[in-house]
Image (tube, rainbow, N blue to C red):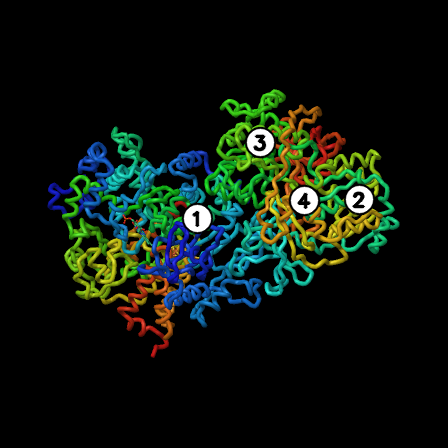
Amino acid sequence: MSADAVRFSEERLAEIETLVKRYPGPQSALMPVLYMAQEDFGYLSMDTQKMIAGVLGLRLMQVREVVTFYTMFREQPCGTHLLEVCTNAGCMLNGAYELAEHMCKTLGIKMGETTPDGLFTIAEVECAGACGGAPVVQVNNIYHEKATPDSMDALITHVRAQAGGKA
Amino acid sequence: MTSLFINNQEVEVTPGTSILEACREHGHDVPYFCYHPELSVAANCRMCLVEVEGWGKPAASCCTPVSEGMKVKTQSASLAKDREMVMEYLLIHHPLDCPVCDQGGSCKLQDYTVEHGASKGRYAEPKRAVVNYELGPFVNTCMTRCIHCTRCVRFADEVAGTGDIGILNRSDHMSIAGIVEEALESELSGNLPDICPVGALLDKPSHDVSRPWEMSHHKSTCTQCPNGCDISIESRGDEVMRIRPIDGSPEPWICDRGRYVYDAFRSDNRILKPTVRRDGALEEATWDEAFEQVSALLKGKRVGILFSPDWSIEGQMAIRLMRDALFPAARVAYGLHRRDMRSFAFEEGFSMTTAQIEAADQVVVLGSDLRQRLPLLMQRLRKRSRAGKPVSRIGAMNYRTNMDISSDALVRPRDWAAVIARAMEQISQVGKTAAGFDSWMAAVPERHEAGKVLADALLADSCALLVGEEIRAHEDAAALIHGLDLLMRACGHAESGNDGRNLIPEGMNRQVLSATHGDVRVSAGDLFAAASAGDLDALILIGSDPVGDGLFPSAAKAALARVPLVQIGSLSGEMAQFAAVQLPAAAYSEVAGTFVNMEGRIRVASNPIKSLGQERPLWKVMMRMIQVMGADVPVVNLDELRAVVANRLPELAGAWGAAAADTVLIKPRRNRDVSYTPVARSDSFELDVVSRYSMYREGMWARASDLLSEAGRIHALDDVLVHPQTLEAKGMTAGEHRVRTFLGEATYHIGLREDVSPGVLFVGKRGVAGDLSDVSGASIVGGASE
Amino acid sequence: MTISSDPKQVKQICFDNINVPDMNKLAVAREHGAYAFLPTVLKEFDSAKIIDEVKTSGLRGRGGAGFPTGLKWSFVPRNTGKPTYLLCNADEGEPGTFKDRDIMRFDPHLLIEGMIMAGFALNVHDAYIYIRGEFLHEANVMNEAIAEAYAANLLGENILGSGYSMHLTVHRGAGAYICGEETALIESLEGKPGRPRFKPPFPAVEGFYGCPTVVNNVETLATVPAILEFGGQWHASIGVPNNTGCKIFSVSGHVNKPGNYEVPMGTSLKTLIEEYCGGLQHGTVPKVIIPGGSSTPWLTAEHYDTPLTYDALMKAGSFLGSGAIIVMDETADLVALTHRLAHFYAHESCGQCTPCREGTGWLERIMDRVEHGKGNAKDVAVLKDAATHMAGRTICALAEGAAAPVLSLLKFFPEDVKTRLAEKSS
Ligand SMILES: Cc1cc2nc3c(=O)[nH]c(=O)nc-3n(C[C@H](O)[C@H](O)[C@H](O)COP(=O)(O)O)c2cc1C
Ligand code: SF4
Ligand code: FES
């Protein structure tokens, strides 16, 4: 597949053009543009990264360095529902590992994996900055605080039901 | 000045100096990995810790500036423990495979382990795995050995300007990497193994062939471009194993051309014995047999002499002596890239040093692919641009520079006069002028907007003009250079002490050649024309290949079809097929000799490597030739020969004294009395032809080098290129097309490239494109003939 | 901004209106006094006066280092010919910290107002909020509030006709704790990996794109409106000398009511935990208190009465840091916790400094073995050596933070380690 295959829409390109103006230099727009690409294309393939380098006038290496440094940029596709369980101190002290184990069991996969139906990816993450609500699970970046095995099971069941309904 | 105490010794350094540099300046040893005097400070290895009195923690000396009265200690028990720990951290993932590593013996990690390391590492966990990557034809990677000092990353960014080496990931997964499917494109890539303090980046060509301690080192001068870098030729016996820059030179780098050309020294292309053509084939002969043949061919004949500018000054002087003794009427050509032989207002060579160019307010590059032509000057320009100083450029192609050009304009060679006239107009408007401005402007009917780029830069307090091959090889070069000279005078950039006029020479020693051969010089083209017209009986070619290089390949072939050729030199090349006799002359690595670079800087090589075969220094070959052909031998040793040189060029008199060598600067010749106005070109070709200079393919040495030839294949462009509009206007697309020149019609594959100026036919691969190298105008006349 | 009707009675500065429903809407915020004092500042104050007031207030940076804010602002060189930038540090990555999030999601206009005032004082025309990537909701709330502020001419060109212009942009990080370190934040905002820069040069002189730059924490900036409205003296009168004002403490771990509590500086740990946080989940006295975020050295039961001030906590051997208090009762497995924190720092090290890159990974791997009963007698000494020689020998303080839990564990609970070793030391 060539880099030409991945393209931002005209609206996106217009959005990027305004975005770039908010910074002293175009490279500052790289992270927001990576988020856009991730939203539009699901993950950041090498072709997407090349395309972005072209759009912002950066070298591919400048894009690669940023994509690989930050954990929230993904070079691989993941499930439609990304479940991120915080297991850092505050959450650990309030049962995060037990919760994570329970969720893996419900999902039938190991930590870091994606369910075969592509609905869920589960990952362990660092402190989410919400220790007052420990344990915390982010679902596609929506915080679920004081999560319990039951509340997570309910969420998983709900998502599965919805997906089943559509199919 | 700031004064401080290092280990109780009071020292003074320039304010803002780092502690590490202060220590280095004053001989206090501080270990380091990531620091490099030519690169920005990264301060990541943390090996350079020192103690500063009153500070709670040890300080990284490379990134801590000195302050008045500071008390620094470079040795203490606690520093020793810190250094031991840094070594331990660094070694936990290191493979410890010194016995099989090429770096062994010149590895900082190995040295420091002995000096600062603990006797035994305590790391008991698994070591990380790391992937290798592609860094071009000259660099091997073994990334498990990497210590993440980021020197290579900074080198790629700051010196090479490619930025293709980066830091991926973070934490201890962090890795130094290139772009996986793209090899690094840098003409300076061979420096990477040098700057890597460990064995992660290694020289590919010398991989596994020898160990650092087996080499002998010979200080010499690289003659592969007019920059004339100081080099150290490392040999084992008589075999050159590698070429490296010399520590403490003005530039710590050398380019890949100068570094990897060494395999040509022992290539099959070398002329290592005299040969004589018998029954159509060149056969080995004795020196006596060969000279007999030379004598038979040349005695009493009308000869033309063509030689390469790369020979040492002594060799060139000997050529002159040979000419004067044997062929006092002979015409001499040196160089292959000049059509207009009128005197130039400023002749080839630099008025400025590269350091002055780096520091100038403005730099304008006119018609030069500087990155290929003078890679180390290009690197200087990148350095200045990183410091925020502008570089402007006008030329037939947006040659890749790996830097941001501040103002840029594309022009066809035929537009140069209009560009200069436009600049003159703008300069006049602000009240600056020079005698001759008006008549020069009046001779040019058009104005070209690119002249604004030039004029804007000229208005600065100091401006370095770098005039390149597009102008030097122009048919009306003398007029253009006169115009530029007027501009420089008008703007005050032509005075001694502030002279910004630099004409990029074709090769080394150019300033000296004006003095030693200027009076008998003709263009190589004239020489070939004379031979073809029956006005010459023979040609003597000394280290030059006019079929492979230069502007006159077809003319050279025609001439050589008519008259016999005596070939003298180190390399056979394509010329061998024409030679009646070959005499071997020693290569630049094999002689004691003197060289002058484009700045006029003198270098004397005095420690040559051993010859491989029967080749002798050129001056001895010349003297022998004089003797054999019955004239008086003018000099019998190098000192006498040098005395003759000094006679012609008094500046050089002191050059062979002890310390003077590095400081003598020979200025290029100025011809104040010339005055030429441009003339309109008469032919009717729609496109101007410009050919590319490729550092990997130009010159006999480069073509004889497999290493450079391989790199040349990687860096190749299409044979012939035009701007897309050029074909569009004719309703054509890229592909095979017939091209008409004054030599006739031929079919070429024509590719498209945005960065070629409209109206230009760009010859990307000289030689392959044959006849196109000879012409300056061409028309595309139609699709391929069926 | 107005503090409860009588400033003398103030208990909360940043959180004064935190529970007001819809406080993130401009109209509601205005009803509660947001931007009321701003015109006066823009009209009657000048840079020197603002910086003076902030100096007088004794406000110290709430991001972790506790550096006096007024002093930091006064370091910014004037008339350099370059723009000055104001960057709000909303990266909030220090494990245990979650206070900035509440300011941003519940009272975003307070932060905006603080930034306008700070920006005005420093002659800033472009300001940025660098918010951690995970705070998507908070970034959205901030962006909506900023849009409303632009519409009301509180941001943008010629704010409220004062002639002062400032633009404010929210910039999301993407999962890198190190980007909370101010120079890493700057690198990140320049579109690069967040690798800290060595100092000098300090950001105040050469920061964002080489220009003078001030980086302040969300809470620091949110305190500015009250200081200007009620005066530096007023702020200085709260708390104790050299530790003035209120501070938000994010309390988590084994307490019954974890959460954010804004209390006057000088309140004791014990008071905070017992009176505000509903005490411990098990037992009466905590086993370990990490007082300023996971990077700060541990305190134990003997420090339970320590007042929460920069000075007192330092005296006790730790730091107030970001005010993130992680409380552990007797049920905590300290070896497991230390291993978990070692994993965190190994994961978050930017990788550039040798001791941090290699040391954090090394500590993690040893702690992993020790936690799982595979440790040996030599491990204690190696842990100690490897941790000690990371701290204070690197570009930024992450390495020091990484060493802190390991060194604290070894210092206070050596037995917890020894009993886990497979091969006991002699
Ligand atoms: C590893 C590391 C992480 C940090 N993380 C944060 C952070 O998340 N938020 C923050 O405000 N300051 C953080 N800081 C402190 C900042 O470097 C800086 O001191 C602070 O933003 C200055 O703002 P203040 O003066 O208002 O406190 C961190 C420092 C270090 C060394
Ligand atoms: S201490 Fe660690 S996180 Fe900080 S700069 Fe050095 S390597 Fe990066
Ligand atoms: S030389 Fe100073 S940290 Fe590497």
Q: Decide: is B386 above or below B418.
A: below
Observer-side mark, 2 or 1, equals 2
Mark carried by residue B410: 3
Frontmost residue, C174 versus A94: C174
Q: CA distance from mark 4 to mark 1?
A: 40 Å
Query: Percent x, y for residue A152?
Result: 31, 54
Asked whether the residues under the numbered discs 4 and 3 touch, taking CB atoms below 8 Å apart as contact, a structural biologist would say: no
Within 10 Å of the Cα at label 4, are there few (<14), some (14-19), or many (20+) other Cα atoms? Answer: many
The answer to whether B627 appears left or right of B96 in the picture is: right
Subunit bearing disc 1 = A
- Residue type for callout 2: Ala
Residue at the spot of label 4? B698
Residue at the spot of label 1? A66
Element type where label 1 sits in the image: helix
Q: CA distance from mark 4 to mark 2?
A: 33 Å
Say whether mark 1 is within 8 Å of ligand 2: no
Asked whether the residues under the numbered discs 4 and 2 touch, taking CB atoms below 8 Å apart as contact, a structural biologist would say: no
